[in-house]
């Protein structure tokens, strides 16, 4: 039986903590844009614990003040290297809203206070370390580095940026999840031969004047070419996109000026035993005590009593960059390891009997898509679920369901929820109804969140998502199961506005669908072009890189605002934008009082002025009379 134990110490964040652990000089210094939470849902904690497990000492500097040198030198010069991560999110996503306004809230900072990390944090931290610690190798990683590893479009600056490896002046970039890669690299650093080993390692990028084996490499259009020509950008994206597979991916090279950024093939998927080991390391499973005065770190609340069951996603949604970061091949933990973690959670302070989630990027993708992926990798140029479910796809919820069944009978556990995203097209393809039945009966807390994103076939095809008919079928089945179980549980659908391919026609089509189904989504998401995704390449170029076809892109703030308003057309604050959208689209038939209308017609100006005058008169007549008598002198 697997047994997980809590750690007995945090990674040191001060000289005193180093002294308490008997460390005179660190082997590795880890700098991160997030607060330090020692939990396996936070990348720096995993990296630090893995290196510690491999025999190296690691110290951590969380959210240093980048305007001075003080924080960067407080733990001293590391013996082997400095590691840099922007955090669990791209720092620009952390710092700005979809409207490019600074966020006041940052869940990965103490007390949720925003503004504690710089823009493009990986670049800023790495360059600061280069100044403070000359000669120390600098290794960058994390999702920001991973998704910006080649020339990429940056929406916040509205320009094509160079590889983050070049702008950060780092020695090595570790992309993907990186566990095996960072330990292998650490051992080469300790042996002193890391420079010679780069060309044979997986899961890294490095720069050089020449590509070691040009005949085996895929050469992308250069940074200068993709910056100058959008078709070259689209071509470069497509070439790199098909090399993201660990089984069949090749070396990728892209010239930046007089040097190449060289991307080695992705790291091989972790075995079940390796992934178990990652999550069974002795984490403290809480935020560092230094943050108690701030009330902790909000991001921990959602995951503290959740369990990661697997990695990877073969759904390949175009707007999600997981294909470039975690890959399409599912890597899963053993049932024994998952149950051991569940038993550990029951012993943690604050546990009230509820496991908030058991899942991964997509909860019901618990096993590898097909046997072919394990041997030859994911199919180049094909998707597992789009445009139709592949006939070779292994559709089976039994292993995942068995985990949930065993977990919910562990003493001390009252309920096990599934809150990770579900692919309902995969669920519908399962000939057995056991998973849906038990999901409804045992694993939903009143509502099930799913993400159809859109219902127009033109848009869902570009998103890589199932169309309206599949969503309708799932809604019908879900409702029927709830009725059979005597439950009143609701669907909470997420929809996205302004995705590439969505013209005003498609936006209105979605609004009409919401009208006909009676759905009133409280939250809608305006598409944000984050680095590394296929949808972002469409947004920047106006081209679908995989087909070469032109795509309409809602770029202007006015069009984006109208499309977003249509998703909540019933809200009074959106009336003017919805009215303008319908008029510009020639859909005045949706303005009126009929059952198919979205909004009422605008009132004549005279009527509005009369109503305003009447309201002013009513206020005067109902205003309380002023008391008579001597006026009081004003207070000083």
Image (cartoon, helix red, strand yellow):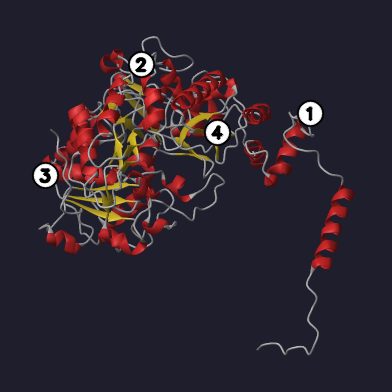
Residue pictured at 39% horizontal, 29% vertical = 441
Give the foreground label among 1 and 3.
Answer: 1
Residue 589: give its label: 1
- Determine whether 54 is above or below 379 in the image: below
Give the percent coordinates (x, y) of residue 494. Answer: 52, 34
Between marks 3 and 4, how big is the CA–CA gap? 47 Å
Between marks 1 and 3, how big is the CA–CA gap? 71 Å
The image quarter containing residue 401 is top left
Task: Specify which label sits upstream in the sequence, 4 or 2.
Answer: 2
What residue is shown with label 2?
395
Structural crowding at the residue carrying mark 2, measured as other residues with C-alpha within 10 Å and reported as few (<14), some (14–19) or many (≥20): many
Task: Specify which label sits upstream in the sequence, 3 or 2.
Answer: 3
What residue is shown with label 3?
55
Between marks 4 and 2, how big is the CA–CA gap? 26 Å
Residue pictured at 79% horizontal, 31% vertical = 588
What residue is shown with label 4?
495
- Left or right of 345 on screen, residue 155: right
Task: Specify which label sits upstream in the sequence, 1 or 4.
Answer: 4
Give the percent coordinates (x, y) of residue 223. Answer: 44, 33
């Amino acid at each position: 039986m697997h047994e997980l134990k809590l750690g007995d110490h945090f990674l040191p964040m001060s000289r005193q903590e180093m002294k308490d652990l008997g460390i005179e000089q660190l082997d590795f210094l880890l700098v991160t844009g997030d607060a330090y939470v020692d939990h396996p849902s936070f990348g720096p904690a995993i990296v630090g614990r893995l290196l510690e497990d491999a025999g190296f000492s690691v110290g951590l500097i969380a959210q240093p003040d980048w305007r001075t040198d003080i924080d960067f030198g407080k733990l001293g010069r590391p013996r082997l290297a400095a590691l840099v991560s922007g955090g669990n999110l791209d720092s620009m996503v952390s710092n700005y809203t979809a409207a490019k306004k600074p966020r006041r809230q940052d869940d990965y900072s103490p007390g949720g206070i925003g503004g504690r990390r710089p823009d493009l944090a990986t670049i800023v931290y790495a360059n600061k370390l280069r100044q403070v610690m000359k000669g120390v190798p600098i290794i960058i990683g994390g999702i920001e580095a991973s998704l910006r590893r080649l020339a990429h479009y940056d929406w916040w600056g509205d320009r094509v940026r160079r590889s983050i490896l070049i702008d950060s002046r780092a020695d090595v970039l570790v992309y993907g999840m990186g566990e095996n890669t960072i330990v292998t690299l650490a051992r080469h650093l300790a042996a002193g031969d890391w420079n010679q080993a780069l060309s044979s390692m997986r899961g890294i990028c490095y720069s050089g004047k020449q590509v070691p084996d040009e005949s085996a490499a895929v050469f992308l259009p250069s940074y200068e070419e993709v910056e100058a020509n959008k078709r070259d950008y689209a071509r470069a994206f497509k070439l790199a996109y098909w090399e993201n597979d660990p089984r069949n991916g090749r070396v990728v090279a892209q010239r930046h000026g007089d040097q190449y950024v060289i991307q080695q093939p992705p790291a091989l998927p972790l075995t079940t035993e390796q992934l178990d080991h990652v999550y069974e390391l002795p984490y403290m499973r809480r935020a560092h005590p230094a943050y108690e005065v701030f009330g902790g770190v909000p991001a921990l609340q959602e995951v503290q009593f959740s369990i990661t069951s697997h990695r990877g996603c073969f759904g390949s949604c175009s707007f999600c960059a997981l294909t470039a970061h975690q890959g399409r091949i599912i890597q899963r933990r053993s049932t024994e390891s998952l149950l051991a973690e569940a038993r550990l959670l029951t012993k943690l302070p604050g546990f009230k009997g509820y496991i908030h989630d058991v899942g991964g990027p997509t909860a019901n993708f618990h096993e590898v898509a097909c046997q072919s992926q394990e041997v030859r990798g994911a199919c180049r140029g094909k998707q597992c679920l789009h445009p139709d479910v592949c006939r070779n796809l292994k559709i089976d919820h039994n292993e995942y369901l068995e985990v949930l069944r065993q977990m919910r009978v562990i003493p001390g556990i009252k309920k096990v929820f599934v809150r990770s995203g579900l692919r309902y097209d995969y669920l519908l393809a399962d000939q057995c109804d056991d998973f849906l039945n038990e999901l409804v009966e045992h694993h939903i807390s009143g509502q099930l969140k799913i993400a159809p994103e859109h219902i127009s076939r033109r848009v869902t095809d570009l998103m890589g998502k199932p169309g309206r008919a599949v969503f309708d079928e799932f809604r019908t089945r879900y409702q029927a199961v709830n009725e059979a179980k005597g439950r009143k549980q609701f669907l909470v659908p997420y929809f996205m506005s302004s995705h590439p391919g969505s013209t005003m026609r498609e936006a209105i089509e979605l609004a009409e669908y919401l009208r006909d189904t009676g759905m009133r989504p409280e939250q809608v998401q305006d598409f944000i072009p984050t680095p590394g995704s296929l949808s972002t390449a469409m947004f920047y170029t106006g081209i679908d890189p995989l087909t070469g076809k032109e795509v309409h892109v809602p770029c202007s703030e006015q069009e984006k605002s109208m499309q977003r308003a249509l998703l909540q057309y019933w809200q009074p604050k959106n009336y003017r934008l919805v009215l303008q959208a319908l008029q510009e689209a020639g859909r005045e038939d949706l303005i009126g009082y009929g059952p198919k209308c979205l909004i009422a017609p605008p009132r004549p100006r005279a009527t509005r002025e009369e109503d305003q005058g009447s309201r002013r008169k009513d206020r005067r007549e109902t205003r309380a009379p002023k008391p008579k008598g001597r006026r009081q002198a004003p207070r000083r």
